[in-house]
Image (cartoon, grey):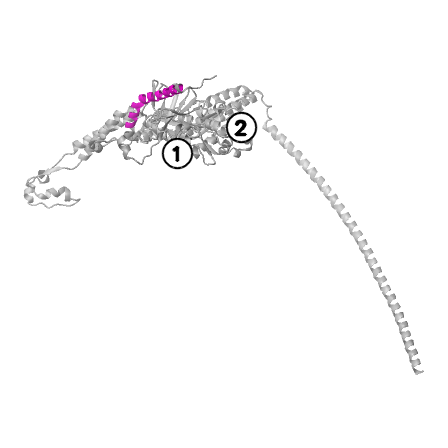
Amino acid sequence: MAKKPTKRSEATKLQGYLDAISKYDREYKPWEERVNKILKRYRDEQRRSTADANAAKFNILWSNVQTLVPATFARVPQPDVSRRFRDQDPVGRVAALILERGLEFETQHYPDYRDTMTQCVHDRFLGGRGTAWIRYEPHFKDGAAVEGQITEDVEAEAPEEQLDYECAPVDYVHWKDFGHSVARTWEEVTLVWRWVYMSEEAVLERFPVEDFPKLYKDGKCTIPFDATPEDLKRADRNAQTDVKQQAKICELWDKEKRAALWISKSMKESLDERADPLKLQQFFPCPKPLYATLTNETLRPVPDFTLYQDQAHTLDTLADRAAGLAEMLKVKGVYDASADPALARLFTEGNNGTLLPVKNWQAFAEKNGLKGSIDVFDLTPIVKALDSVYLAADQQKQQVYELMGISDIVRGASDPNETLGAQKLKGQYASMRLRAMQGDVSRFATDVLQLKAQVMCSKFSPQTLIAISAAEQLSEVDRGNVPAAMVLLVGEERLQDPKAEAPNPLRSFRIEVNADSMIQMNEAQEKTDRMEFLTANGAFMDKATQMVGQAGAAAPIIVPLVMEMWKFGVTGFKVGKTIEGQFDEATEKLKAMAANPQPQPPSPEAIKAQADMEADKQKTMREGQQQQADTQREQLRAQEQAHREQMECAHKEQLDAQQKAHEQAIRSMELDKEDAFKRWEVEENNRTKIEVAEISAGAREGVQ
């Protein structure tokens, strides 16, 4: 059972950390003083006395830094995530694609990565060391966000807090605020720390009273706020009342104990301690610093300016002397006081084409004119001395450029009298000298991106990774591999439980994270190499095809030899490395085809005769089909005509029958009408007779 640490053991451990910090301060104090002087020279802040302030300077340091920074850091490096061995691994490919798109979002959406890389590269060429620090920073929808310059493993403790978004910032660490255990090489370093200046609000947020009650007394934080990031003198500090004091906190990571501590500079006690907060592969949240010149005996870098400071001092002396000689380049002289006073106005009033009158010309001419009355100071020695100073300055600058590896090609200068071969040699020389610097910057950017990738996979929620990588916009085939790819990145357990520990994707040996090519000067060479590769292989393909086509039965012997020769040429190009896998696959297929040749195709004459026979056969078949179709067409036409006549006869008979029936119906109706009329006529006659008889009978009765 592990023993609970006592106050004495905690004090002993803390004192060990403080001793390590003190040892670093003692060892690196001369380096910090040297860097301060270099920065003052770079900013032209070394002019103290009046004489020094008026002296001319040649700031070769500023010129070199402004040349080397773009030569080694032309653009911000972007992430390049790929399968480690380029195998047939669709899950690994999709996982690499998701992680690369997530890193691209982090590096492009937030400015911290770009700014930190720029500041670290400048620190490398000035002080000799550039340092970055990786953090995990979640933000919650209720407005609470864990921000500030503190690296920690933060989890949402309150259940009502809902994660809004999360990021992995890259902090720039000032060269004065970074430290590590004194060691000979970076692999021997066991402690790293950085000093963080925190405002009162940041301290209260980072160390809340409910979690750290020992840091509060009567409701007030006991951490002293007595420091500022600036190096202010005691005399100036009292005058600058507007500068708000901050708490200086040391964030220390112990690789051997796999723990991180936070220590106050003034309190000399531990504020917080956490066990392996980020679960990184190399434990440290910072990559190996971007160093200048190092030796195997110490990690104290040697700034580049130190290597040519003597030449820079000589250049300052020569620049001051050149300025003095240029000031002396004035037309000065004396004239005879007994001569005409108009001679004094010769250089002040005499313009181009203007003549001045002289009294007593006869006496003036007897004294040999102007030559006998005026004597001008000879400027030839001063001009020669100035030329010598300029020549010496050029020689000193050339020595500096040779020390730093800055040729005329890098500086953008060129001698028109030089041959093309001389220019190419200079360009190759510059590339050789700059390659080490470019490689260091590329390595540093790769380390930063690898740390960001590990933080994203171990701390980001799976939903965040899918969202920032836009995985739903992948192709349909790739979307089918997204679940398996997420298992590779964050682990099966963490997909079910976001708080579970995630496996490190860099330890799966299936994907790797790098920085793409960032050197603008190498882009043209890369394009030239690719075009040379394509041209050479295209010409060889044409020759090889002709050779194999003419080999005939010897093709199974010639093809393997040709493919091996082709592969020998491909492997000689570095740009062809990415397609060597496809080339090997094609080589094996061609060898297999040559070992099992297909039957020889027929000759062109036989193919033509066969084609002619097939054409005649097709023609005869088409004529027979056409004749059969014509016969069928005539038969159909005759059948249609007979059917039409039959239908017409039937229709005519039907019409005749209908007409007869109609006529009979009309005749019958007429007869019926005639019979009805006759009956009506008979009935009317009878009715009339009756009425007449009744009238006659009534008349007789009246008479009686």
Dot 1: element: helix
Relative to 616, residue 493 above or below: above
x and y, in percent, of residue 188 in the image: 38, 18
At 58% from the left edge and 21% from the top edge, which residue is drawn? 596
Tell me where the magenta segment starts and ends, as one range: 9-37
Marks 1/2 in contact by CB < 8 Å: the verdict is: no
Q: Earlier in the sequence, mark 1 or mark 2?
A: 1
Q: Disc number at residue 495?
A: 2
Residue furthest right as drawn: 704
Say whether residue 92 is left or right of residue 611.
Answer: left
Helix, strand or loop: magenta stretch = helix
Q: Can residue 187 be seen in this view?
A: no
Instruction: Give the residue type at disc 2.
Output: Leu
Q: Does the magenta stretch include residue 337?
A: no
Magenta residue check for 19: yes
Q: Position of residue 665 (x, y in %)?
A: 84, 60
Q: In terms of depth relative to the viewer, which is nearer, 4 or 641? A: 4
| Nearest to the observer: residue 526 or residue 694 | 694
Q: Residue at x 57, y 20 (%)?
A: 595
Q: Which label lies toward us, 1 or 2? A: 1
Location of residue 600 in the rendering, given as x and y in whole percent from the top left corner: 59, 24
Q: Specify the label residue 201 is tagged with.
A: 1
Task: Give the residue furthest to the bottom.
Answer: 703
Q: On screen, 496 above or below 635? A: above
**In the shown orientation, is residue 165 left or right of residue 327?**
right
